[in-house]
Amino acid sequence: MHRSLSNSPGDPISSGPSGGAADGLSLPARLEAILYLKGRPLSLGELAELAGVDRDAAELGLITLMADYAHRDTALEVRQEGRRYSLQLRDGLAGLVQNLLPVDLSTATLRTLATIALRKRILQSELVELRGSGAYEHIKELLAQNFIERRRQSEGRSYWLSLSEKFHRTFAIRTEEAQSQPSQAA
């Protein structure tokens, strides 16, 4: 039996609850984002719950995502480990990453840092919700290496996390303000 993998409106692959930033994204794209942000293997049930769809829709979306990765030349792949799925570098690329990274951070800690960078500023409690309880250790490591700054929330018990100057220097990411100013010759 052949299943259609189209992304037409009303399909379980393209439909789903409104989710702010997820609006307009196909289900495979949302599953990809979930796998990336969580940074650990997830069961089909966890993926369905996080994406706000039923297990059958999540399975079809995951099959579509896996097929997409299998048919393109990319460094990433959706890997199945038992009954869990994760987004990882293809075999043979881990050594390349270690040679290219200017810092000594684990992949999970780098994903946590990437999540902070994407949001510019995020509550620690939101980050832990997105990345899991391991994020507490990642935050400690990132603070110790001065890649992020932490400030107490004015109302509430959590902390605001943001990127430090060292992050911008190390990863050569210019702020919008710096990009809009013409460079000056010395």
Image (cartoon, rainbow, N blue to C red):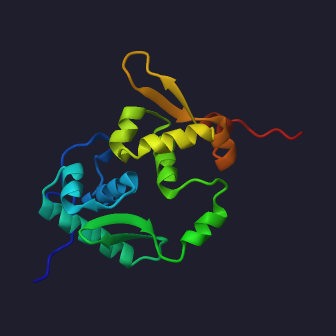
Q: Quadrant of residue 78?
A: bottom left
Q: Quadrant of residue 186?
A: top right
Residue 134 x, y percent position in the rendering = 40, 47
The residue positioned farthest toward the top in the image shown:
155
Horizontal arrangement in the rendering, residue 46 relative to residue 85 (left or right): left
Give the vertical position of 173 relative to 65 (above or below).
Answer: above
Residue 183 x, y percent position in the rendering = 77, 40
Q: Residue at x 47, y 47 (%)?
A: 112
In the rendered image, which quarter contains the N terminus?
bottom left
Q: Residue at x 53, y 77 (%)?
A: 92
Give the vertical position of 46 relative to 130 (above or below).
Answer: below
Residue 137 x, y percent position in the rendering = 47, 43
Q: Quadrant of residue 154?
A: top left
Residue 95 x, y percent position in the rendering = 59, 71
Give the vertical position of 33 relative to 179 (above or below).
Answer: below
Q: Is residue 118 visible?
A: no
The residue positioned farthest toward the left in the image shown:
1
- Nearest the viewer among 171 and 96 is 96
Give the vertical position of 86 relative to 128 (above or below).
Answer: below
- Nearest the viewer among 150 and 35 is 150
Horizontal arrangement in the rendering, residue 89 relative to residue 46 (left or right): right
Horizontal arrangement in the rendering, residue 156 relative to residue 107 (left or right): left
The residue positioned farthest toward the bottom in the image shown:
1
